[in-house]
Amino acid sequence: MLSLAMQQRQRLAQAATYPREPVPYSAENAFATVENAKQLCQVQLRALRGDLAILSDMRNRPDKVAYKRETLIPKYQDYIDRYIESGLQHPNEVFSYFVVWHFDTGELETAFTLALIAIDQQQPMPDRFKRRDVVTFVCDEILRALDFRVDQAETIFQQALSLIETDAWAVIPEIKAKFFKVAGTQAEMNKAIETAVAYYEKADACWGKAQVKTKLDKLRKQLEKGD
């Protein structure tokens, strides 16, 4: 079965055959052209601004998570499904928030699947986020989910690690080092000492503040002794 990201690439290719001439905007042909899709996005954004204001007024994190899970995700699900299905592509802040909400609500598998599409489309993060690109944000969220032992976090971490190791994802040295450090810790726990050393060395080479030198010294001595 094709992943959503691969399906999206196919739809993008198909979208090249969409009408290039302007098509009058209406609910029925909102995805007939990119311009129409952008217009619909603006309609969705106006609704989103109101929803974000309600969210901002909430002080309790559990209430915010519940609002995202029970109200916001269902509200925008149909629009996002239609946007992805269309194969059209444009900067889409609603889509970016949709990805964020799935991470916030712990729906990690769906969040990662959506994130792959957002990364493939080079979607921008909303201005209020510290991390200015989707890849870095997603990596932060995966590491956080791993710390909190969210369902599927280990599986998603391994997928993301593979993308980072092969340079399919271009991430800042700090993030790359954090992933390598976690991978080293996991290998060490599994008694795979040589693998742990290799990952710790990568982490140290990426970022001087990775704090793995003590671990490296210990494991290198262990290998020398043949333990």
Image: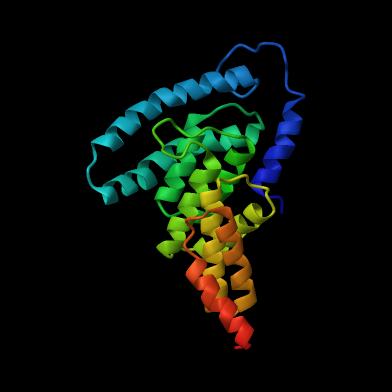
- Residue 121, placed above or below residue 210: above
In this picture, residue 157 sits left or right of residue 46: right
> Does residue 139 appear in this view?
yes
Q: How is the image coloured?
A: rainbow
Does residue 199 appear to the left or right of 67 in the view shown?
Answer: right
Q: Splitting the image into 4 quarters, where does residue 219 fall?
A: bottom right
Q: Is residue 168 left or right of residue 213?
A: right
Seen at 50% across and 65% down, the residue is: 212
Q: Is residue 85 above or below residue 107?
A: above
Residue 6 rendering spot, x and y as whole percentages? 70, 45
Considering the image in quadrants, where does the N terminus appear?
Answer: bottom right
Q: Position of residue 14 (x, y in %)?
A: 75, 31
Residue found 58% across the figure and 54% down from its top: 206
Place of residue 91 in the rendered image (x, y in percent of width and height, measured from the top left): 56, 27
- Indicate the quadrant where residue 83 lies: top right
166 relative to 143 in the view: left or right: right
At horizontal 59% and vertical 62% (from top left) the residue drawn is 158
Question: How many dots with numbers?
Answer: 0
* Residue 185, placed above or below residue 18: below
| Residue situated in front as seen by the camera: 188 or 59 | 188
| Front residue of 88 and 82 | 88
Q: Quadrant of the C terminus?
A: bottom right
Q: Can see residue 152? A: no
- 96 vs 116: above or below: above
Provide residue 168's location: percent of width, then percent of height: 68, 48
Q: Residue at x 41, y 38 (%)?
A: 130
Please identify the quarter of the rendering in which residue 12 is found: top right
